Amino acid sequence: MGLSIVRVKRPDEALVWGVVLEQEVALLGENYPSHRELMTHYFLDPKAFDVKDLERVSYSKANLQSPITSDIQIFCQGLNYASHQEEGGIKAGKGLNLIFPKPPSALCGPYDTILRPSGCALLDYEIELALVLRRDLPAHTQVTTDNLLDYVGGFTLANDVSARDFMFGAPMLQWFKGKGQRTFCPVGPILYLIDAGELELLSELRLTLKLNEEVRQDATTDQLIFKPEETLTELASFTDVNLGDLLLTGTPGGVILNANLRVAMAIFLNFSNDKKRKEKLVKSQQGIRYLQPGDKLELSLTSRDGVRRFGTQVNEVRDANR
């Protein structure tokens, strides 16, 4: 069995790490500057994380912050579930692996407010499993199921929040602005450090997202098209991936974006006219309710059977200029 790690803000604003023990959190004495140092210490000496005699606080009353610090890279996958491909108007199948970055400044906590940027009309959600690297991934490494846990040290829950009109209304369909806004990557609350014998757990996790208490996304990670070992191998072929970096593995079907024929026409008939393309895209989504101020998102990550729980996020949406 692995270890569930959280980061707690004390009343004096100090940030401390802790180990989740059912309804309590045992606070660690070591104040690691980032999750990278914590992971390194844990995998070198797991016994150092013995929680006996440690101060404990109630999990439900703890002020839980992001367990992922911002000194990292965030890599993301798109269209990595067949259900998401199909709702995007794409024939489900294994084509090219869609990989893109998200800036670390997008990171926020599991209960923080998601800020809708000024001018954004099409704010959307994407629940995702995020893998956390336990060591640097050398260039051209071949990652397989046999050595995957040599490189993946844990996982956490993430939301790849997306401003669809910013994405498809920008020059050359620029996703960075549409997915890279501040607060567009809530993570946590739990960073689960995976045990060497838990490889199968990565394909037996359930992702569930509710919008205002209505289930919108519900899927299991065995549905991933490109598996983690394939994506890490591809990343290592062209870029540096380091200890502590995140890989968001894609979202299942159930997002708000209605990628119909009108969307395709809006994009491709106006490919060289950014302003017109954005206007046509927004018009194609008339009648569809995107995220609004006051909306509440609840995301959860569990084992397939629901017995093991790896954290719940609750985020409210509000306008950035208010």
Image (cartoon, rainbow, N blue to C red):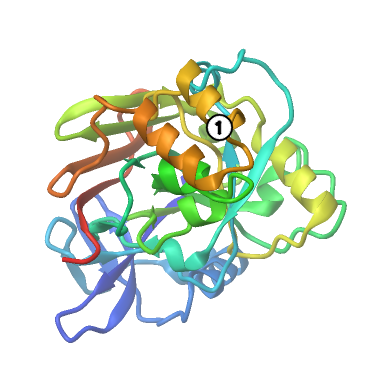
Where does the image place residue 170, in percent across and percent down from the top left?
53, 50
Where does the image place residue 255, in percent across and percent down from the top left?
38, 29
Q: Which is more toward the observer, 261 or 189?
A: 261
Where does the image place residue 147, in percent across and percent down from the top left?
75, 44
Residue drawn where x is 51% and y is 34% of the image: 201
Q: Which is more toward the observer, 171 or 16?
A: 171
Which corner quadrant of the image does residue 164 belong to?
Answer: top left
Where does the image place residue 74, in percent across and percent down from the top left?
57, 58
Q: Which residue lies furthest to the top in this view?
A: 91
Q: Tell whether 20 sits left or right of 273.
A: left
**As drawn, 192 above or below 299:** below
**As drawn, 268 above or below 197:** above
Give SS at disc 1.
Answer: helix
Residue linked to disc 1: 267
Residue drawn where x is 26% and y is 84% of the image: 14
Q: Tell whether 262 sits left or right of 255.
A: right
User: How many neighbours does mark 1 have within 10 angstroms: few (below 14), some (14-19), or many (20 or more)?
Assistant: many
**As drawn, 147 above or below 132:** above
Q: Which is more toward the observer, 240 or 136?
A: 240
Q: What residue type is labelled 1?
A: Ile
Would residue 160 be visible to someone looking at this image?
no
